[in-house]
Image (cartoon, grey):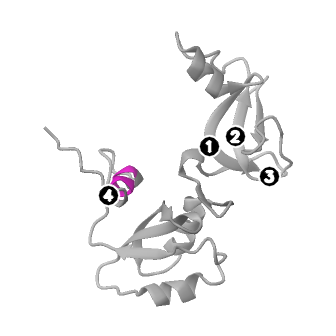
């Protein structure tokens, strides 16, 4: 759109604009971008920095100007200071022919702070073990990106619109009680 600029900003240093190909937060400037949240100056200050709307999406721009979203900022797993993007881990696991659905969340790890954990539903009549999956992922993910644990389930929780629910799995891992539907 005319007058619109998309920038990729560093997650650690939000004022720093990253070069082509580097992952960071997608920020947008332009006449159609909101000026702020109604009657919420604190939320506005968090969402708009230096005149750019901070989307909360992690992505990168290629040399042709195409923008690719790889994850959400709130979903990033920080393991020993290293950033792990759950969507990239999920994409690698989805390459296995036995996997029907997968979602990855960060779980508490005493040594690294957080560690990735994968919840997997297999296709009907397919089998897969943790060790087989680790071998499959060895050349697709670094050792720190590979999940520390896998949980195979018959079904994975979904939101009302049918998306896999990381929030519900995170609540389970944190020992929080499920909200009852009344």
Task: Name the element at disc 4.
Answer: helix
**Separation (CA) of disc 1 from disc 2:** 6 Å
Q: Nearer the viewer, mark 4 or mark 1?
A: 4
Placement of 53 over or under 135, stated as above or below: above
Element assignment for label 1: strand
Residue closest to the far top: 39
Q: Position of residue 32 (x, y in %)?
A: 66, 19
Q: Nearer the viewer, mark 3 or mark 4?
A: 4
Residue 26: mark in rendering: 2
Residue located 37% across and 74% down the image: 151
Contact between marks 3 and 1 (CB within 8 A): the answer is no
Q: Could you say where residue 160 lies in the image, as x and y percent from the top left?
A: 29, 44
Q: CA distance from mark 3 to mark 2?
A: 13 Å
Q: Say whether residue 64 is left or right of residue 116.
A: right
**Prevailing SS of the magenta stretch:** helix
Q: Which residue is mark 3?
A: 62
Q: What's the magenta region?
A: 167-172
- The percent coordinates of residue 146 (x first, y second) are 57, 75
Q: Earlier in the sequence, mark 1 or mark 2?
A: 2
Q: Residue at x 59, y 66 (%)?
A: 112
**Quadrant in the picture for residue 181:** top left
Q: Residue placed at 30% from the left, 51% from the top? A: 176
Q: Please name the residue that numbered disc 4 is placed on.
A: 172
Please state the horizontal and vertical placement of residue 44, each as a whole percent of the image: 61, 20
Membership of 168 in magenta stretch: yes
Callout 2: 10 Å neighbours few (<14), some, many (20+)? many
Q: Residue at x 45, y 69 (%)?
A: 118
Q: Is residue 49 magenta?
A: no
């Amino acid at each position: 759109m005319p007058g619109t600029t998309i920038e990729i900003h560093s997650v650690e240093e939000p004022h720093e604009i990253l070069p082509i190909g580097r992952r960071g937060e997608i920020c947008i400037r332009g006449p159609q971008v909101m000026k702020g949240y109604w009657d919420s100056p604190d939320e506005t200050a968090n969402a708009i920095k230096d005149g750019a709307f901070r989307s909360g999406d992690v992505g990168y721009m290629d040399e042709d100007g195409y923008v690719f979203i790889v994850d959400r900022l709130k979903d990033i797993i920080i393991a020993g200071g290293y950033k792990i993007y759950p969507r990239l881990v999920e994409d690698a696991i989805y390459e296995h022919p036995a996997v029907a659905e997968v979602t990855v969340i960060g779980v508490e790890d005493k040594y690294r702070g957080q560690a990735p954990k994968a919840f997997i539903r297999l296709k009907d009549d397919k089998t897969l073990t943790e060790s087989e999956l680790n071998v499959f992922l060895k050349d697709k993910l670094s050792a720190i990106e590979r999940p520390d644990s896998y949980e195979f389930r018959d079904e994975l929780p979904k939101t009302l619109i049918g998306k896999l629910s990381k929030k519900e799995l995170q609540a389970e891992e944190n020992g929080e009680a499920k909200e009852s539907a009344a």
